[in-house]
Amino acid sequence: MCEQHLSDEERDHKPTGPVAFVDELVVALTNGRIYSREHPRVQASLDTLHDSLREMLRSTNGRTVAIGASDGFLFFERRPLLGATLSSQRLIEPLMALSSGGIAFEPTTSRDD
């Protein structure tokens, strides 16, 4: 769930991990399509996405975070992200349109990237 819609208590216990990261990525992409880059929703979703990326980088000990796409599924570390199936199509479709097998985030990825 997008952090923007969480209560303070929920924000303290928000989900982490690859499924949560994909969910935040989809929220940021969707908000970016609807609103201008300067819009508060876009800015908030970028902040949340970058926080989620930093959490993912901590969990991978600073290695690149790569989300793969194949046969209508997303993968992280060769495991399907089944919990991301509802939102995954919004990420899979653009990747397939680009003939891409996924997307990777380096440890140096900044919020502006």
Image (spheres, rainbow, N blue to C red):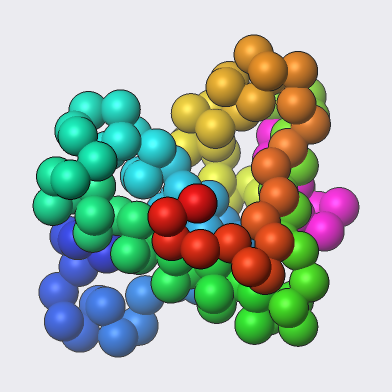
User: Residue 93, percent across and down?
Assistant: 58, 20
Q: Quarter of the image holding residue 15?
A: bottom left
Q: On screen, 19 above or below 52?
A: above
**Horizontal arrangement in the rendering, residue 96 relative to residue 55 (left or right):** right
In percent of width and height, residue 78 lies at 86, 52
Q: Is residue 92 magenta?
A: no
Q: Residue furthest top?
A: 97
Q: Which residues are the magenta region?
A: 73-79
Residue 17 seen anywhere in this rendered image of the structure: no
Quadrant containing the N terminus in the rendered view: bottom left
Q: Position of residue 106 (x, y in %)?
A: 70, 61
User: What predominant SS class does the magenta segment belong to?
Assistant: strand
State the residue in front, 37 or 14. 37
In the image, residue 62 sits, relative to residue 69, either above or below, namely: below
The front one of 37 and 103 is: 37
Front-lying residue, 53 or 79? 53
